[in-house]
Amino acid sequence: MPAAAPTAFYAAYDAVLDRWPASTASPASPAGRVERIDLDSAYGTTRVLAHGPADGEPLVLLHGGGSTAAVWFANIADLGGERRVYAVDRIGEAGRSRCGERPIRSVPDLLDWLDGVFDGLGLDRADLCGHSYGAWLALTYALRTPRRVRGLVLLDPTQCFAGHRPGYLLHALPMLLRPTAGRARAFLRWESGGAELDPGVLELYGLAAEFPRRKVVVGKRPTTAQLRGHALPTLVVLAGASRAHDVRRVEKEVREQLPQAETAVLPGVSHHAMPAARAGELDKLILDFLATRVGRPSS
């Protein structure tokens, strides 16, 4: 990995973060456009980006694999206008979180870390939204700890209801075997099917591939029994042009295994274009769902 990679990565990260709107909670704060919260634990220090009114109902955001918390820039104005939003940089991956003495080696470790994030933010319960791998983590956490999740939003979730397409894994293989910024960007361009990509996000995604990281925990897909026992209000938003998996099959599996869930498809959006692509439509789907299906917490 080039020695300058972390410096270039942080510059790209901050450039995307600079696109976040001014925080309504403290618009004149020294932190600028976003409130930064660092949570310490045995696993290390987790960076959380907070936005929205301090007394707003909490919404925790979990980014996709190879991404960071900064990439919610296109969604944060809408979501943070109604909710107290916490976008989390997963520990051990590219981002502003820092690993500690205890590495995350298993799914129980990963869920214990997320429990600690909730504790550190003072959240007994919160709405939880994840994209891709972040959606798998959100669903897995909700299945294990439903008492802490009010409503669940899964954005083009992978390894939740169906596996990856073989072609997707084949195209990802060079990047996985020897990650470079060029390979990561080429993969993103392929998955987008030639659609225009945000230059800042493309730059950050490429540099994230060269960022020092620990091995990402990969867990099993939830069983049918686990999914049918899941009673939390759930919204699944699928990327209509996703190459990661067969969207129609995922939608079919959701309806069969999670019949209480709502589903929606954003036509023309690729898997990795979320959450920025058609952000206004996506944000409205999320906020309408949380308002109508989840509602306000009981006092």
Image (cartoon, rainbow, N blue to C red):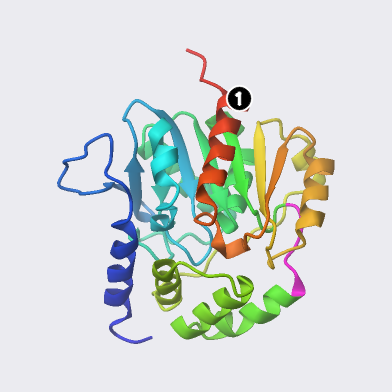
- Closer to us: 70 or 232: 70
146 falls in the magenta region: no
Q: Which residue is most to the top? A: 299
Residue where numbered disc 1 is placed? 292
> Which image quarter is the N terminus in?
bottom left
- Closer to us: 108 or 206: 206
Residue located at (72% from left, 55% from top) = 221
The residue range painted magenta reads 161-166
Q: Is residue 281 above or below residue 157?
A: above
Task: Indicate the secondary structure of the residue bearing disc 1.
Answer: helix
Amino acid type, mark 1: Thr
- Would you identify the image quadrant in which residue 195 lies? bottom right
Left or right: 231 as drawn, with respect to 129? right
Residue located at (21% from left, 39% from top) = 27
Give the total number of marks visible in the rendering: 1
The location of residue 285, given as percent across then percent down, is: 59, 39
| Residue 83 visible in the snapshot | no
The location of residue 133, given as percent across then percent down, is: 58, 58
The location of residue 295, given as percent across then percent down, is: 56, 22
Magenta-colored segment: predominant secondary structure: loop
Q: Is residue 116 above or below residue 198?
A: above
- Closer to us: 161 or 19: 19
Q: Is residue 204 above or below residue 176?
A: above
Residue located at (42% from left, 79% from top) = 210
Q: Is residue 284 above or below residue 220?
A: above
- Would you identify the image quadrant in which residue 26 lies? top left
